[in-house]
Image (spheres, grey):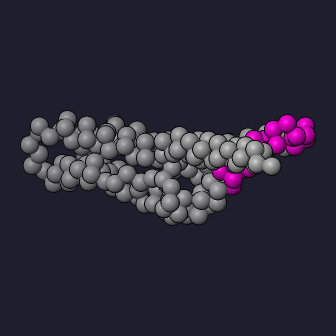
Amino acid sequence: MCLLIQHCVKILWLYEKQLRNLIFCSSCLNTLKDFFSALEIVRLLRNALSLPLLIALMISLLNLFISISTLLIESMDVATILALEMLVTSLNGSIILLTLTLQAAKIPDSLTKIKGTAGTLLVKHSKHNFQNRIAKETMYLLRRIEESELIHLSACGLIEFKKSFLLSAVGGLSTYGLLVLNFKRTDIKEP
């Protein structure tokens, strides 16, 4: 999944690089129209990865939660092999969570850069009073690019993958870890 996302980000990066070097001519219309093809690729990726992202997210969060709860509940009774297994499990969950979230967050960042570049070109060329059809159509397409929507990858529409999601995930795991620890303490106090 990360490789597919990286490939999509590379397409957007290359497009943004082309857009920065745009010169108003008849061939620039094809370059500007390529944005909508790239946007369609992002939409297809979002639809294709929706369920796999949810499954990967659930696996990683459950791995982390099981590791945390096992270490908190059986902190002194954990054997060396079990501790090693919990370490590997939590490392696996952390890597999945971090890589997926950070890679998926690059797509809206790339789209934002493209929109910013289109806005810069609009401002730069808005002073000119273009009379030819190519320049007018170029300005129209630049406006459409600037006003296009930001697309976030999501896990079946439940969770959008943004960098701020990492903070929410860590907070949720910490909260449930504390709840598990409190359940353990109340079980010990009652005879």
Q: In the image, residue 158 lies at what x, y percent?
A: 50, 60
* Residue in view at x 23 percent, y 50 percent: 143
Residue drawn at 20 percent across, 35 percent down? 124
Image coordinates for residue 9, horizontal then vertical, percent? 50, 46
Kindly identify the residue that appears in the image at 25 percent across and 41 percent down. 119
Q: Nearer the viewer, residue 103 or 125?
A: 103
In the rendered picture of this protein, how many numbered marks are placed on residues?
Answer: 0
User: What stretch of residues is rendered in magenta?
Assistant: 59-82
Q: Does the magenta stretch include residue 65?
A: yes
**Residue lying farthest front?**
191
- Closest to the observer: 59 or 112? 59
Does the magenta-highlighted stretch encompass residue 130? no
Residue 172 image position (x, y, % from top left): 58, 46
Q: Residue at x 64, y 42 (%)?
A: 178
Answer whether residue 130 is visible to the viewer in this image: yes
- Magenta stretch, overall SS: helix
Q: Nearer the viewer, residue 27 or 13?
A: 13
Q: Can residue 84 be seen in this view?
A: no
The x and y percentages for residue 91 are 73, 40
